[in-house]
Image (spheres, helix red, strand yellow):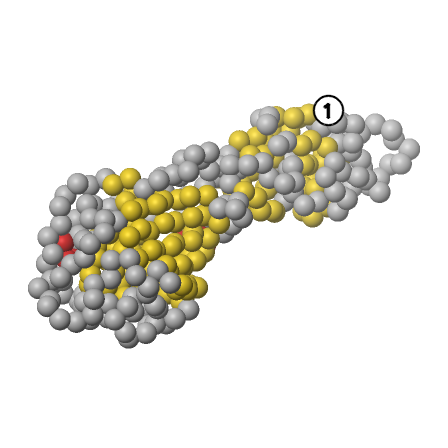
Amino acid sequence: MRTSVVGLTVVLFAFAACKESSNDPASGPLTTLLVLAGGASQAGVFGQAVPIAPTVLVTDANNRPVPGAAVTFAVTRGGGTVSAASQTTGANGNASVAWTMGNTFGSNMLTATVAGLPPVLFNANAIAPAAGVLAFNLTDPTADTLTLGATTGPPAIDLISIRGDYKSDSLIVTATFSAPVVLGTNVANGLYGYIDFDIDDNAATGIPYTNDFGGSANLGIEYELDFYNDPTSMLFYSLSNTVVVAASAAGNTVTARIPMARVGGDDGNFSIGGVIGTRDRPTDIFPNAGQTTVRRDFGIASTGNIVSSAGRIATRRGTPGRTWTGRGQIR
């Protein structure tokens, strides 16, 4: 039984059969390039080396290992790097490289090629470390809530901060308020509202941000996280579908977990803006000036960056098709 440097089982191979010649000590033409155990598909932390080094085996027409064969490794998706662009197979016919994934979520791909043979493919899903990486941390001024001319009704809900952390395969969004809040209840401190995501940072794509209630963001919205009438979840809208994501409220904070797969395995670069309120009316736009643009700055905790200084004016939403129900603008 042949043993590889990383495992014992061949999980993917292309095989060309021919007549064996057990008396012939010489290797025949190269006919087979194999991906060895565990390396063909795996998961790992973005910006770090994958747990199992990609390893291939080259064999001849008699299914024997071929030493000295040149193998080329090339990253084809994800922007990662390999320890060497080419390797030569050893006495056991194996060649291996260390593969560091790129600084993005989702699929990373690597190909291994030997001249004259079909290439083989390695795939690795990049996730964040379990301990988390800061995505953004937006501080919103206190006592900046909207009145919209109202003199009665529930007290205004004042957003203090909104933070995002990448943990494993999700973006964890935590909003903190000046007083205790709840989800899914029609009471004075029951939350409604939305957070808009411009995933590609292109205001010309997606749904245009309509600057409701005086917000000055310039977004082309691909996704929207909605506070709505449920104590344990929020709605996450996209242009094509709506999913429910887990959420919870405890004291002054609300937390939602958005799987990165739900945003197409986004690279972690996006812009956000939004508005929070009670069931009957909006109360707080965030950020006050423009939007927050999030950039993945690997190795350093990224922070939100206000990219517009335009002021806001408290005006009622008048855009056709959008009404204040706490439910989204993406339909």
In the rendered image, the residue lying farthest to the bottom is: 186
Counting from the top left corner in percent of width and height, residue 85 is at 58, 26
Describe residue 249's horizontal placement relative to residue 273 as left or right.
right
**Which residue is found at the position 29% from the left and 39% from the top?**
305
The N terminus: image quadrant: top right
Q: Quadrant of residue 33?
A: top right
Describe residue 78's horizontal placement relative to residue 221 as left or right.
right
**Which residue is found at the position 60% from the left and 39% from the top?**
50
Mark 1 secondary-structure assignment: loop
* Residue 162 appearing in the image: yes
* Residue 238 appearing in the image: no
Counting from the top left corner in percent of width and height, residue 229 is at 33, 72
* Looking at the image, residue 153 lies above or below residue 7: below
* Looking at the image, residue 223 lies above or below residue 65: below
Counting from the top left corner in percent of width and height, residue 124 is at 56, 44
**Which residue is found at the position 11% from the left and 67% from the top?**
150
For mark 1, what is the residue? 68
What amino acid is labelled 1 in the image? Gly
Describe residue 152's horizontal placement relative to residue 265 as left or right.
left
The C terminus: image quadrant: bottom left
Q: Quadrant of residue 325?
A: bottom left
Describe residue 168's horizontal placement relative to residue 33 as left or right.
left
The one nearer the camera, 41 or 150, is: 150
Residue density around tag 1, few if under 14, some if 14–19, many if 20 or more, within 10 Å: some
**Which residue is found at the position 74% from the left and 36% from the top?**
5
